[in-house]
Structures are given as C-alpha cells and as structure tokens.
Image (spheres, rainbow, N blue to C red):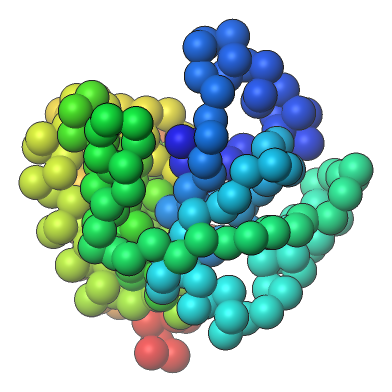
C-alpha cells in the first residue's frame, strides 16, 4: 500500500524502481486527505486505484477540480513541468473509522480532521507504524487550512496520542519519520502551539526547528482562519 505521494516528477518517476529495489510492489494507493500534494500516487502508478476516506471523497465532490488547480499553481511557482495532468481515475471511498485488509494483516483507518475538513491516519499495528497525514510533523507547525478547525485539530491530536504510544515509528506527511519519543514530544509541542493559536498570540514561541520564516507565515494564515471561523 502506497500511502500519500511525493511531489516532484523526478521523485514520482523514481518511486516504482526505488520501492521494487526494497522489495515492495504496491497494489493499492491510499491518501490521508484530499490536499493536492497527497494525491499524486497515480502519476507513479497509473494502473492502481486510489483509496480515500469517505470524507475526502465528499470533499473532492464539493470542490471539483480544486486539487488539479492547486497542483497547477504550485507547479507554476516551482517551474515544474509534468508529462501529464493529474487524473485521479477511479477513487475508492473507505469508511473512517474503519479498516482495510493488506494481505493477512489489517490497516486501521482513524479519523484525522482539523488540518482540513477531511483526513485519516493509518495505523499498521502489526509492524508498529503510524502514518499520521499532515499531523506530528517535525518540520511544520500545525496548519489549520480553510475548511479545517482548531477544535477538530485538538481532537485529532488527542485521538493520535494512544496510537503514537502504541507505535514504534510515526511517519508524517512532511518531514522525516520519527520514533515514538520524538513523536510524543512533537505532539506536546503541537498542543502548546494550539493553545497559543487559540489565545490569539501574534508572535508565539514556536517549537525549536519549526520557527523559521515559513512557519511564521503559516501561523499568520492560521490566525486568519481562526478569526474568520
Ligand atoms: Zn495537507
């Protein structure tokens, strides 16, 4: 199961060979949420169907063409050219909470909204891996997108906490995988950040390593989303 996707065409092109070299041949794609940068798996594996949580399928129907537009905008910004536009093909909606079978094992799908209106986290309990989507990143502060909500973000972190406790490795959508202890530290920092956001701090102390200029501008955008909520 390939969960989410890289962004740059070179990465997508290299992915099948890289995975094959490590002994993996995915036979299904799964995206944690419907933001464009998580939906690109079919550009690497055009023959595979994309699985999405039902809230993500509903979001795609509510915002037709939005993912393709966002991808075009980012590609323009980074001078990225692609051999073909993004076609999501046949999308398979999955109940969340729920589970999907993977061979003889089971992937648990847990609700993870707040960053956006949709979202799921994938727990592979038998191998101790939690794929958190756009939560628990070591490089990005919590981002409450338009459509997301602070209270939902908090609830998702509370839901993720016992999953992190039960995991050996937490794989965020952005940044490197982390061990349990680091992921728990990030979770605490994120709770503190959400408190500051809720208080409306203009210049909160951001977590170490996530306090550069881009993170400040994410905070400003978060403040705009909170104010207009
Ligand atoms: Zn996202």
Seen at 53% across and 30% down, the residue is 26
Establish if 150 lies above or below 77. Answer: below
In terms of image quadrants, where is residue 197? bottom left
Q: Is residue 44 left or right of residue 115?
A: right
Seen at 25% across and 58% down, the residue is 98
Establish if 156 lies above or below 99. Answer: below
Q: Is residue 3 left or right of residue 108?
A: right
In terms of image quadrants, where is residue 66? bottom right
Q: Is residue 193 left or right of residue 73?
A: left
Q: Is residue 37 visible?
A: yes
Count of numbered tags: 0
Task: Give whichever of 70, 89 is nearer the camera.
Answer: 89
Seen at 18% across and 34% down, the residue is 125
Residue 149 spot, x, y in % from top left: 34, 77
In terms of image quadrants, where is residue 103? top left
Residue 71 spot, x, y in % from top left: 73, 59
Residue 159 spot, x, y in % from top left: 15, 58
Q: Residue furthest front?
A: 104
Seen at 58% across and 61% down, the residue is 91
Residue 64 spot, x, y in % from top left: 68, 79
Establish if 29 lies above or below 202. Answer: above
Quadrant holding the C terminus:
bottom left
Q: Is residue 71 left or right of residue 174?
A: right
Q: Is residue 201 visible?
A: no
Task: Give whichever of 87, 68 is nearer the camera.
Answer: 87
């Amino acid at each position: 199961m390939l969960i989410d996707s890289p962004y740059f065409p070179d990465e997508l092109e290299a992915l099948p060979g890289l995975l094959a070299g490590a002994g993996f041949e995915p036979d299904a794609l799964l995206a944690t949420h419907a933001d464009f940068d998580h939906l690109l798996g079919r550009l690497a594996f055009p023959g595979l169907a994309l699985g999405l949580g039902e809230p993500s399928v509903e979001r795609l129907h509510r915002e037709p063409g939005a993912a393709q537009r966002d991808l075009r905008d980012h590609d323009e910004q980074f001078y990225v050219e692609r051999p073909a536009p993004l076609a999501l093909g046949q999308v398979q909606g999955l109940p969340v909470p729920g589970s999907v079978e993977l061979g003889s094992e089971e992937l648990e799908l847990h609700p993870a909204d707040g960053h956006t209106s949709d979202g799921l986290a994938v727990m592979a309990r038998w191998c101790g891996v939690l794929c958190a989507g756009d939560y628990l990143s070591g490089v990005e502060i919590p981002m409450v997108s338009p459509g997301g909500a602070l209270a939902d973000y908090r609830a998702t972190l509370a839901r993720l906490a016992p999953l992190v406790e039960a995991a050996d490795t937490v794989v965020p959508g952005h940044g490197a995988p982390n061990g349990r202890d680091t992921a728990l530290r990030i979770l605490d920092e994120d709770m503190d950040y959400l408190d500051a956001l809720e208080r409306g701090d203009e210049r909160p102390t951001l977590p170490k390593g996530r306090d550069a200029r881009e993170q400040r501008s994410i905070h400003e955008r978060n403040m705009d989303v909170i104010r207009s909520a």
